[in-house]
Each structure stands twice: as structure tokens, then as C-alpha cells.
Amino acid sequence: MKISMVKASATALAVAMGSFSLPVAGAIDAGRAHEAMIVLDTHFDTPANLGRPGWNIMDRHVEDIDGDQVDVPRMIDGGVDGGFFAIFTASGPRTLDGNREARDFAFRRGVQIREMIARHSDTFALALTADDAETAVRQGKRFVFLSMENGYPFEGYISLMSAYRSLGVTMMSPVHTKNNDLADSSTDKPEWNGLSPAGKAFVAEANRLGVLIDLSHASDTVVRQTLELSKAPIILSHSGMRASFDHPRNIPDAEAKLIAAKGGVIQINAFNGYMIATPSIPEREAALKELMASFSSRTGMTSDARRALVAKRKEIDRRWPVPKADFDDLMSHVLHAIKLVGIEHVGISGDFDGGGGIEGFRDVTDFPKVTAALLKAGYKADDIAKLWGGNALRVLREAQAAGDPATIPSIPTTN
């Protein structure tokens, strides 16, 4: 029996019984337990591949050769039911022209995601609510939520948030690696001392629209201010724990507790530089900079060019090696978060196709390893299911419940 059929039948049985509850640890093996869960990732950067000539999410790719980490065959292998596909817009000039270019880019990327769903409608289903995701699983499809990483496309006009919401976006973050007109980044020098006036308007509008606020990349002050202002819980879609590794992109324990106290969720990511110390090697950094400058953006990159990029990156790693984070480092972050705030407020994101991936956790086929590790550590399958999807769907429901019902789009039903 195919893995996808096992997932569909197990889920259907759970629904028929009135819930998605799972057997306790030890009652079934880790693989079967994982397959019975709704498994999602809250931050896929995979949409950046959608403009590449000849690239198809239905094809199987090889991370070690192609550099790609998410596609349908490997989602099936990893028992992954869906996730949040990010509309990532890189920071640029904070000018009228820059804002317009960011606005248009984000709309185009969102349309590409919608086109992917429509082109493969027998495989994918658009999800606008948590119920939509659960319906897709029952139908044996992979669900696709749209999210926005970086508020650059709407920082000049907060009213644009409603247009992106109408496109299907359910989660938005205000800032990325550099400060913008909304907020301070965790990896930039403070400019606004948290949220700007426009950033505070972003929080209010997100609440009104029922949009889940994502504060990965935001400064600690932005996190605290948003928690004070928001009527709904928030999420960190791909972050780490600063107590496990001291990096500004990781959340301190104090702020993590505040997020949990408001009902939010911290999704632990697998980004090497945020998990262990990486020494600065000038020659390596210069070589990486030269390599990236020699290639255009991923959009338009052929498969051969992509493979050449991966091969040259490997050569740089060979010449100037640096320590690599591994699966144990990932679990260190996960277990610390669970111990600190409870498994009801923790999740997983590989940050795949966006720089994530560590030794032993390279692509979505490695997701079952987390389930096996947590079962071995004594956690019940019911609780692990919360970590894999239940927590994220819960917090999305709560964000939408706090919004104006008239602003929540729905998928039309047909007779």
C-alpha cells in the first residue's frame, strides 16, 4: 500500500471515530504513528522555484545534487500533508518605486502559487482555514496555505494587506533580515525601538483580517510590543531557542514564555547558522559572495545552472570547512522549547528551500525522524501530533476567530 493511501485511510478512520487522536507511544511503530498525524511545515520557501524553467513540484529532486528540498514525491515519503508556502520578498529600497516593485513581485508570486495548485488540483488543495487543511487530508490531497515573509510589499500602504488576504494569504510577517518601515529586524541595528507607527497599524489590520502574525526575524522588542497590542496569539514560523544557541534570530526564554502565555506557537527551524557557532573565514565568505554574484536569482535558473551552483558551493565547503549542525542540535532546540513552554506551543519548520537543512535533516523525507525521536523520549503520539500540525492549526483558528468574520475568505462550494 502506498504511503499516501496509508495516511488517507488512517486519517479517515480517525475522523470517523470523531477525532484525530492517535495511539499512545509504543502501541504502533514510529512510522505508522507519523503517517497517522497531520504533518505540516509553517515555512516552505519552495515557491521561489516556481519560476524556474522546467522545474515541476511533481518531479522528484535530489537535495545533494539539485539543492531542492521539497516536492510531492518527497512530501509523500516524509508523510507531509502540506504547509505554508511563503511569498518571500527580499528587502530593497525604501522608496515609492521600491514599494511598488515589492508589491507587484508579491502578487506575481502569490499567483504562481495559486497556479501551481490549480495545475495540480488532483494533488493540491488551497487552504484558507484550518478546516480546509483537514478536509484536504481526508480527500488525500496536500494542502497549501499562502504566507508572506517580510512586510515590504505592503509597508507603504497597509490597506494592501486586504488585497493579499483576498489572494489567500493567511499568515504575514512584518520584517525580514533588515529593518523596514514597519519594524526592527532581529539582525539589524534598532531604528524604531520595536514597531513603527505603521507597524502598529499592521498589527491592528492583521487582527481585523484574521491574519496570523508571524514574528520570525523580528527583534525581541517587536515581539513584546506585538504581544501587548495583538488581540490574537502569534507564531514564530521558523525560529530557534536562544538558550540553545545565542543568536539574535533565536527567541529568548522570557519572550518564548510570553508567546506561549498568549497561546502562540514557536516553530523550531533547521538553519545551520542559527543552531551552532560558525567561525568567520574571510576567504570562504569572499568565495561565497563571488559565487552568488555570478548567478542570477533562482527565478529563471535552469536545472543545469542550479546543479552547477550546488557543486561550486560544495567545493567552497571542502576548501574552507565549517562546523555543521546535525539532528541532535535540532532536537536540543526542540526539547528545550518543549520543556520551557510545553509541547502545546512548539512546532517544526525545516526552513527548506530557503537555506535550511542540517546533517541528518536535509529535506522533508527526514520529518519522521523527529517523531521517532520524540516517541523514544517518551512523548505520546497525541502530543507529537500537536507539534506537527495541531498547534499551528489551532493558532490559525484563534487568529481568524479574533478577526472580522466578513474579512475571512472561504472556498466556494459546488453542488
Image (tube, rainbow, N blue to C red):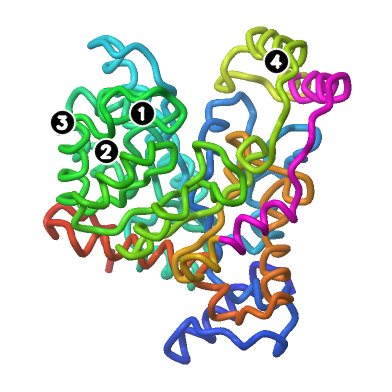
Disc 4/disc 2 C-alpha distance (Å):
37 Å
Q: Nearer the viewer, mark 4 or mark 1?
A: 4
List the residue tagged with mark 3: 197
Q: Secondary structure at mark 2?
A: helix
Sequence-first disc among 3 and 2 = 2
Residue wearing tag 4: 285
Image quadrant in which you'd find residue 373: bottom right
Residue 170: where, in percent of width, then height? 32, 49
Classify mark 3: helix, strand or loop.
helix
Observer-nearest residue: 354 or 124? 354
Element assignment for label 4: helix
Q: Are marks 3 and 2 in contact (CB under 8 Å)?
A: no
Write the start and end of the magenta stretch as one range: 309-336
Question: Going from the N terminus, do you reach mark 4 or mark 2 first?
Answer: 2
In the rendered image of this protein, does residue 202 appear above or below residue 411? above
* Most foreground residue, 380 or 189: 189
Residue 365 found in image quarter: bottom right
Tell me, for residue 275, which label it has, or none.
none
Residue at which label 2 appears: 164
Q: Please name the predominant secondary structure of the magenta segment in the image.
A: helix
Vertical placement of residue 90 versus 412, above or below: above
Query: Around disc 2, counting alpha carbons within 10 Å, would you say few (fewer than 14), some (14 to 19), or many (20 or more)?
Result: many
Is there a contact, CB below 8 Å, between mark 2 and mark 1? yes
From the image, state whether disc 4 or disc 2 is nearer to you.
Answer: 4
